[in-house]
Amino acid sequence: MPTKLTATSPSRNPLNSLFLMVFGLSLGLLTACANVIPPCNAKTSPPSAELRNTKWELTRWNLTPNSNGEVRTRQIPQGEASNPIQIVFDANGQRVSGSTGCNRFTASLDEDSHGFTLKQIASTKMACAPQRMELENDFLYELNDYRSIVRNGDQLLMIGADREVLSFTQRPNK
């Protein structure tokens, strides 16, 4: 009786099945890691030395994604004529100061192995238009409660505990 030869289907090959299973698990883990937000008590940042003597202007404010996962942006005044929101890191790496668009603020830098944290944030108290005051209050809240800061060249992202992202662009430090 002749021997019957059959081709093994790739989907029935145990090695292919194992490969597909490992690949699927790896992809799932990588996707899950991409969505991780730092823990609520974690604050991470580049070393403050990397930001010494630099000036940054808020150019975009992404709000928390809505229930459909869509990112919404908050309108922010931009450019010198509109008194932009700015952060300036001092040359010694010990303080941050800037403009909220209405008032001035200052804070000290406290650095450890996880990066730096802004402490003792204080601001002037001039009266401004109600919309500008609301923007200022929200900015100071984000400044006080951020979870991580990421620098990518002339871009600085401040990610809040509420998943709002403030995007700053580096400006000449005058």
Image (tube, rainbow, N blue to C red):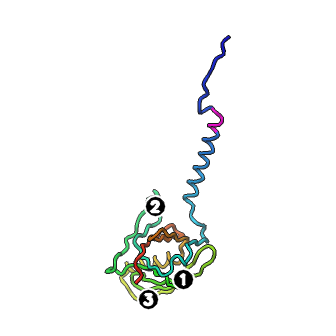
Mark 1 or 2, closer to the camera: 1
Q: Amino acid at mark 3?
A: Lys
- Tell me whether the residue at label 1 lies in contact with that at label 2, contact meaning CB atoms closer than 8 angstroms: no
Q: Amino acid at mark 2?
A: Asn
Q: Quadrant of the N terminus?
A: top right
Which quadrant would residue 7 be assigned to in this image? top right
What segment is highlighted magenta in the picture?
Answer: 13-17
Residue in the image at 55% along x and 58% along y: 34
State the residue in front, 144 or 94: 94
- Residue 162 position in % (x across, y down): 52, 68
- Residue 132 position in % (x across, y down): 38, 79
Identity of the residue furthest to the top in this view: 1
**Callout 1 environment at 10 Å: few (<14), some (14 to 19), or many (20+)?**
some
Which quadrant would residue 3 be assigned to in this image? top right
Residue 80 appears left or right of 42? left
The rendered magenta stretch, by its main secondary structure, is classed as helix
- Residue 163 position in % (x across, y down): 51, 66
Magenta stretch holds residue 164 = no
**Residue 156 numbered tag:** none
Residue 97 drawn above or below residue 8: below
Mark 1 or 3, closer to the camera: 1
Q: Earlier in the sequence, mark 1 or mark 3?
A: 1
Residue 132 drawn above or below residue 72: below
Q: Earlier in the sequence, mark 1 or mark 2?
A: 2
The Cα atoms of the two marked residues, 1 and 3, are separated by 26 Å
Report helix, strand or loop for mark 2: loop
Q: Which residue is mark 2?
A: 66
Q: Which residue is mark 3?
A: 125
Q: Which residue is mark 1?
A: 93
The Cα atoms of the two marked residues, 1 and 2, are separated by 37 Å
State the residue in front, 138 or 89: 89
